[in-house]
Amino acid sequence: MANDWTERYASKVVSADSAVRHIRKGGRVFVGSGCAEPQLLTAALAARGTELADTQIVHLLTLGVAPYAEPKLQQGFRHNAFFIGANVREAVAEGRADYTPVFLSEVPNLFRRGRVPVDTALISVSEPDRRGYCSYGVAVDVVKAAAESAHRVVAEVNSNMPRALGDSFIHVSQIDSLVPSDEPILELSHGAPDEIAMRIGHNIVDLIEDGSTLQIGIGTIPDAVLSALTDHQDLGVHTEMFSDGVIDLVDRGVINGRLKSIHRGKIVASFVMGTRRLFDFIDDNPMCEFHPTEYTNDPFRIAQNTKMISINSALEIDLTGQVCADSIGTYFYSGIGGQVDFVRGASRADGGKAIIAIPSTAKDGELSRIVSVLRPGAGVVTSRGDVHYVVTEWGVADLHGRTIRERAMQLIHIAHPDFREQLMAEARERGYVYPDQIAVLGVGAPELELLESEYVTPDGEVLEIRPIRPSDEDMMRDLFYSFSEETIYYRFFHSVRAMPHRELQHYVTLDYDREMALVAVSKTDEREEIVAVARYAIDPAKGSAEVAFVVRDDYQRKGLGSHLFRELIRSGRMRGVTTFEARVLATNKGMIRLFHTCALGPVESDLDRGEYRLTFTVPSSGDGLV
């Protein structure tokens, strides 16, 4: 009995032409996904195009040719794309093919419940194992549901298809026709990440903690993220798909799944797209577990992964946070895919983060991808209520729970500097921001990253030190109203009762060349508070910089002022400052002591009407900052 399947197998072997002979006019045909497109069967089906009429072809993205979408065969075939690839994009745009917008997690039920019936499933599988089971290989995704729902299953049995493990098998007895093949599995590769992708990847990596579980796809940005994760520990993967970039992190032990909350130690996915190296990696690999998309993309299951990180892309984002990911205006470009599945799943996970990653411009810098309003016809894939983090090469916008004004401010200042003034003008016109709001062009410049650091207080709290941003205005307002009367008096030299926007804006909008302000940020869960600010203004004629400090009362006498002063000196020296000076009330003993402690040379003191002017010269050589 153990060998019964081999006899049945032999009786089902046919040529590709014979296997598709039964497909009738008006029938509904499913074609396997991605790199697992059955190439021989697809070609044989297209060869029958002139014999058929109104035969419907459905599939996700495929990598091979799509002859059934060519104009000359439009009488024989009508394609329906659940995700639009380059091989059918023109046909959809010209109305010769259809597009069905749907969450990837919900596609399988379209087959199972008969809303999208499948007469014939054309799939590609591995050679059977000794018990007669073939693996769906590089694409389980919606293929499994289509095969289990189809009236007839035709499988291209490819000797090059890897044997992927998990819920990823079909028995020979469930296949009606078998077509032997030794065609190379379709591969997808792309160039190394460029500078923009690397900057985006660097910004994303700052959001990823050790022990996180990743959803990460294919492309230069995902590769840039993966290449920047080499110093992380105990990462896991739960994703709809992955590519070659994962392998190096597995080899380094960075990805091990040791801390995953479900499927511990496993890389969970529904398909892969990459090169032969990737196919060999997943072949019979017990670390890799493949499941259909109704499982991998189920938001409730995704949310069970603690520290779940989803990383998805977009075509355009407006200033309210609406994410367009499937169309360019009315031109359908790709599909909804699994973006919303993972955004919602990651958002609900304990410690999870949902990230939309996008270059700031398109068409070689001619167009901004961050816009005041989406172009007419653009599809909102991720709503403004779902969006959390948006990342460009210019920084990170944290939008969840933010007002429209806060969203606009953050998004404008991670847009490309060439478009910020225009975006701010349009935001002012729409009432998104204050009527006098200023756009700052220097925010997010790579050189500002050199001024980022951490400071650990004596009681063990880790504070983030970074340049101030225009979007810090609300936190600066909170800081001001937390001050004691004494602190306000020492900082402003007189009593200040209020700090309205018209005043506060000048403290958070700098040019970063002649002015610099560093803030110390305390983070508790998802709440951030600025607890200290140190700033200077440069007099270019004298090469000197006047400094000012303010530290929240409960953070004073923790060494924070000294750290900020040293960081200001480091920043000033980078900009050619030779002298630092400060105006200090004679009664402000703490500031006087701070100035003398941090000075790099002798301090000159001039007292006039109860106010000291303190000055020191920066040494011309040696670092002096230890």
Image (cartoon, rainbow, N blue to C red):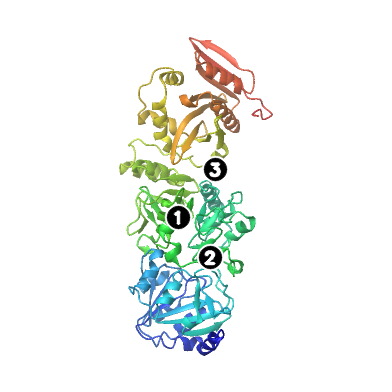
User: Which residue is at the far right?
Assistant: 622
Q: Is residue 290 above or below residue 493?
A: below
Q: Is residue 569 above or below residue 307?
A: above
Q: Is residue 602 left or right of residue 119?
A: right
Count all numbered tags in the image, as a single digit.
Answer: 3
**Distance from label 1 to label 2 (Cα)?**
17 Å
Percent position (x, y) of residue 49? Answer: 41, 84
Q: Badge 1 is on which residue? A: 304
Q: Is residue 580 left or right of residue 333?
A: right
Q: Is residue 36 left or right of residue 95?
A: right
Q: Badge 2 is on which residue? A: 289
User: Do we see residue 37 in this rendering?
Assistant: no
- Disc 1 secondary structure class: loop
Q: Badge 3 is on which residue? A: 446
Percent position (x, y) of residue 616? Answer: 60, 20
User: Do we see residue 16 in this rendering?
Assistant: yes
- Amino acid type of disc 2? Glu
- Which of the labelled discs sits on residue 626, or is there none? none
Between marks 3 and 2 in the image, the one whose residue lies nearer the viewer: 2
Percent position (x, y) of residue 169? Answer: 50, 74
Between marks 3 and 1 in the image, the one whose residue lies nearer the viewer: 1
- Amino acid type of disc 1? Gln
- Disc 2 secondary structure class: strand
First reached walking from the N terminus: tag 3 or tag 1: 1
**Residue at (36, 65) in percent of width and height:** 101
First reached walking from the N terminus: tag 3 or tag 2: 2
Q: Is residue 614 above or below residue 150?
A: above
First reached walking from the N terminus: tag 1 or tag 2: 2
Is the residue under label 2 in contact with that under label 3 (CB below 8 Å)? no
Q: Nearer the viewer, residue 361 or 568?
A: 568
- Amino acid type of disc 3? Pro
